[in-house]
Image: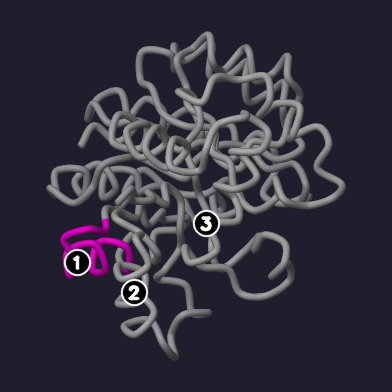
């Protein structure tokens, strides 16, 4: 049996408070072999550590999402660095730039993106990149930071084929999730057709971005077979191959 690796989830989110234990039990039965639970704030770093330490098939990342960088200071950065020593922590993220919202100011986002990339280099962990409406600045900053030497994944990839090529040249994986099943995802479908399967990792970003036919509902790793099916059709390979290759990619990404 092939297992699925959900390389980007938020099971510490309050959306799962009512049935978290039961749901996580069902994931394993459904062939979800590993999950990366991704932090987005200092508070979710703590809840992610707790979750990952309670389940041997769940890993964690620590980092502060661009929209939460207003809360960051040197003390917070130092604390994140210390958490990277924990065996369950396998990445720094999600970090990056998000220009969809006005706040925090772009220079604040950039300051802490740079600082967290530097931290990842020091602790020798891959980075999980969040980039929304900030294609050029994200890429420019990653190049300036030598992110190719750090390694990692551009989560929920939403840019062009040309931009995908830039990231592949840096050795980054691209995170592909439920958006691939949306009828208006033409650009993303072109990207998936274009990039090698060896560069794709599967993700949910749950509780967000549930695929069709569950679009708009709470997402979970149980929906990943829909994404597998979409990738398999675009790549012209069977679903088992998609699961097998992306499982290996996930292990490679997080150095497991």
For the residue carrying disc 1, how many other residues have a C-alpha within 10 Å: few (<14), some (14-19), or many (20+)? few
Please tell me which of labels 2 and 1 falls first in the chain.
Answer: 2
Residue sitting at x 34%, y 44%: 77
CA–CA distance in space, label 2 to label 1: 9 Å
For the residue carrying disc 3, how many other residues have a C-alpha within 10 Å: few (<14), some (14-19), or many (20+)? many
CA–CA distance in space, label 2 to label 3: 14 Å
Magenta run includes residue 60: no
Is the stretch drawn in magenta largely helix, strand or loop?
A: helix
Residue sitting at x 22%, y 58%: 57
* Residues drawn in magenta: 47-58
Q: Which residue is mark 1?
A: 55
- Select label 1 or label 3 by which is in front: 3
For the residue carrying disc 2, how many other residues have a C-alpha within 10 Å: few (<14), some (14-19), or many (20+)? many
Residue sitting at x 50%, y 49%: 203
Asked if the residue under mark 1 is in contact with the one under mark 2, i.e. CB atoms within 8 Å, the reply is yes
Q: Give the side of residue 195 with respect to residue 18, left or right.
A: right
Please tell me which of labels 1 and 3 falls first in the chain.
Answer: 1
Label drawn at residue 213: none
Please tell me which of labels 2 and 3 falls first in the chain.
Answer: 2
Q: How is the image coloured?
A: one colour
Q: Which residue is mark 3?
A: 224
Q: Which residue is mark 2?
A: 24
Residue 138 in the image, given as x and y percentages of width and height: 63, 26
């Amino acid at each position: 049996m092939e297992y699925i690796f959900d390389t980007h989830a938020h099971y510490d989110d309050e959306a799962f408070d009512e049935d978290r234990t039961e749901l996580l039990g069902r994931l394993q039965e459904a062939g979800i072999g590993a999950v990366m639970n991704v932090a987005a704030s200092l508070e979710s770093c703590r809840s992610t550590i707790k979750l990952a330490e309670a389940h041997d098939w769940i890993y964690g990342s620590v980092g502060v999402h661009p929209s939460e960088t207003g809360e960051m200071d040197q003390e917070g950065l130092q604390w994140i660095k210390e958490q990277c020593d924990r065996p369950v922590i396998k990445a720094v993220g999600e970090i990056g730039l998000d220009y969809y919202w006005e706040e925090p100011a772009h220079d604040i986002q950039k300051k802490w993106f740079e600082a967290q990339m530097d931290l990842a280099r020091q602790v020798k962990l891959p980075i999980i990149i969040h980039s929304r409406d900030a294609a050029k600045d994200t890429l420019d900053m990653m190049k300036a930071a030598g992110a190719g030497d750090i390694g990692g994944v551009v989560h929920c990839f939403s840019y062009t084929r040309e931009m995908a090529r830039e990231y592949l040249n840096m050795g980054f994986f691209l995170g592909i999730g439920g958006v691939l099943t949306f009828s208006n995802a033409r650009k993303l479908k072109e990207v998936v057709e274009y990039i090698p399967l060896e560069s794709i990792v599967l993700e949910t970003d749950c509780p967000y971005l549930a695929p069709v036919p569950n679009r708009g509902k709470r997402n979970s790793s149980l929906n990943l077979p829909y994404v597998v099916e979409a990738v398999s059709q675009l790549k012209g390979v069977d679903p088992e191959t998609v699961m097998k290759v992306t499982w290996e990619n996930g292990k490679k990404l997080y150095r497991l």
